[in-house]
Amino acid sequence: MATLTLEELAEILAPGQPIAGLDLGTKTIGLSVSDLGRRLATPRPVLKRVKFTQDAETLLAFADKEKVVAFVIGLPMNMDGSAGPRVQATRAFVRSMSDKTDIPFVFWDERLSTVAAERTLIEMDVSRKKRAERIDSAAASFILQGALDRLSSLARAAREED
């Protein structure tokens, strides 16, 4: 398993291969998956975290079911750009996953993704209780959508060069 930049991932992706977005929390993992055209991120049910081995097995089963070829995982940087304990935990999770899969991971700066997800859920008039259940997958969708938009921009730039 490799950790790639989004630009490196863009070079190896084939058409029709979906990618997944992850919002790694201490109690849950928010999930989203792209459509086959990699234009739209769709939330999936949240994974409740148990122990790393079980979390990894559940995540890989999800990837197998959805035919995911890469994970875009939110990197929770501090607002000043520094890396705190949550960044270290996310990087450690990805390192541990390297023993279990060849699926590449891409880190994506997720600053404000949870805030944006919560605002969207509030605008949709989702109750406070249901927002708590859905916030991590909504954040994963924001993370993935940002990466999908960047992939689309890279593809347009590559076509213009040709």
Image (cartoon, rainbow, N blue to C red):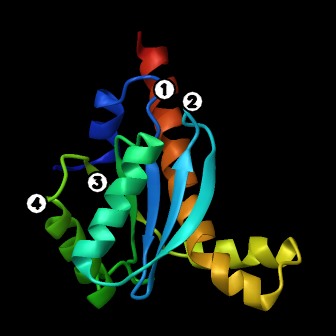
Q: Mark 2 to mark 4: distance in Å?
A: 29 Å
Could you tell me if the residues under marks 2 and 4 are in contact, i.e. CB atoms within 8 Å? no
Q: Position of residue 1 (x, y in %)?
A: 16, 50
The CA distance from mark 3 to mark 1 is: 18 Å
Check the image and name the residue furthest to the left: 99
Whether residue 56 sits left or right of residue 96 in the image: it is: right
Q: Which residue is mark 2?
A: 37
Residue 86 image position (x, y, % from top left): 32, 85
SS at mark 2 in the image: loop
Who is closer to the viewer here, 50 or 156? 50
- Measure the alpha-carbon separation of dots 3 and 4: 13 Å
The span from disc 1 to disc 4 (Cα, nearest Å) is 27 Å
Few, some or many C-alpha atoms within 10 Å of disc 2 (few <14, some 14-19, many ≥20)? Answer: few
Q: Residues within 10 Å of mark 3 (few under 14, many from 20)?
A: many
Q: Is residue 142 visible?
A: no
Any part of residue 4 in sight? yes
- Tag count in the figure? 4
The residue singled out by tag 3 in the image is: 105
Q: Crowding near pointer 1: few (<14 within 10 Å), some, many (20+)?
A: few
Element on which disc 3 rests: strand
Q: What's the amino acid at mark 2? A: Gly
Q: Position of residue 55 (x, y in %)?
A: 32, 73
124, 11: nearer the viewer: 124
Residue occupying image coordinates x 45% and y 51%: 20
Q: Which residue is mark 1?
A: 16
For badge 4, the amino acid type reads Asp
Residue kind at label 1, given as amino acid type: Gly
The quadrant in which residue 87 appears is bottom left
